Image: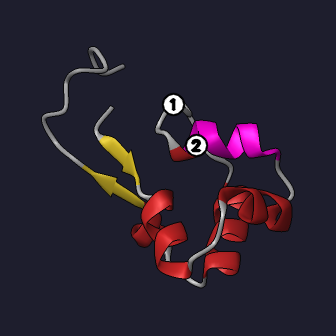
């Protein structure tokens, strides 16, 4: 998928464990791991907003577009 999720980068910059972020935004660590590892097919804006608020960042700090990454299959 050409959308890359950089939550782990922001977590490292903030020196915050995944479990703490999950607790603060109100989702399970397993669901946050799915998003963090790039396996999610979608993210709710409310979840993205909560992550940005807790990590004091912008959505562009968490998500980026990598054109040409066709390993995930054809576009829909």
Mark sitting on residue 39: 1
Which quarter shows the N terminus?
top left
Q: In the drawing, does residue 58 fall left or right of residue 55?
A: left
- Dot 2 falls on a residue whose secondary structure is helix
Residue 60 is covered by the magenta coloring:
no
Tell me where residue 72 appears, x and y as whole percent. 31, 20
The magenta stretch spans which residues? Answer: 28-35
- Horizontally, is 23 left or right of 15 in the view? right
Residue pointed to by mark 2: 35
Labels 2 & 1 near each other (Cβ < 8 A): yes
Residue 54 to residue 30: above or below: below
Image coords of residue 39 (percent x, y): 51, 31
Task: Tell me where residue 60 appears, x and y as whole percent.
Answer: 40, 69
Residue under the image location 55 percent in, 80 percent down? 14
The x, y position of residue 70, in whole percent, is 19, 24
The local crowd at label 1, few if under 14, some if 14 to 19, many if 20 or more residues have their Cα within 10 Å, is few
Rendering quarter of residue 46: bottom right
Residue at horizontal 75%, vertical 56%?
Answer: 19
């Amino acid at each position: 998928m050409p959308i890359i999720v950089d939550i782990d980068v922001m977590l490292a910059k903030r020196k915050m464990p995944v479990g703490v972020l999950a607790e603060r935004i109100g989702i399970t660590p397993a669901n946050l791991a799915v998003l963090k590892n790039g396996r999610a097919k979608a993210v709710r804006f409310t979840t993205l907003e909560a992550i940005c608020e807790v990590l004091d960042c912008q959505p562009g700090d968490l998500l980026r577009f990598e054109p040409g990454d066709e390993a995930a299959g054809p576009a829909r």
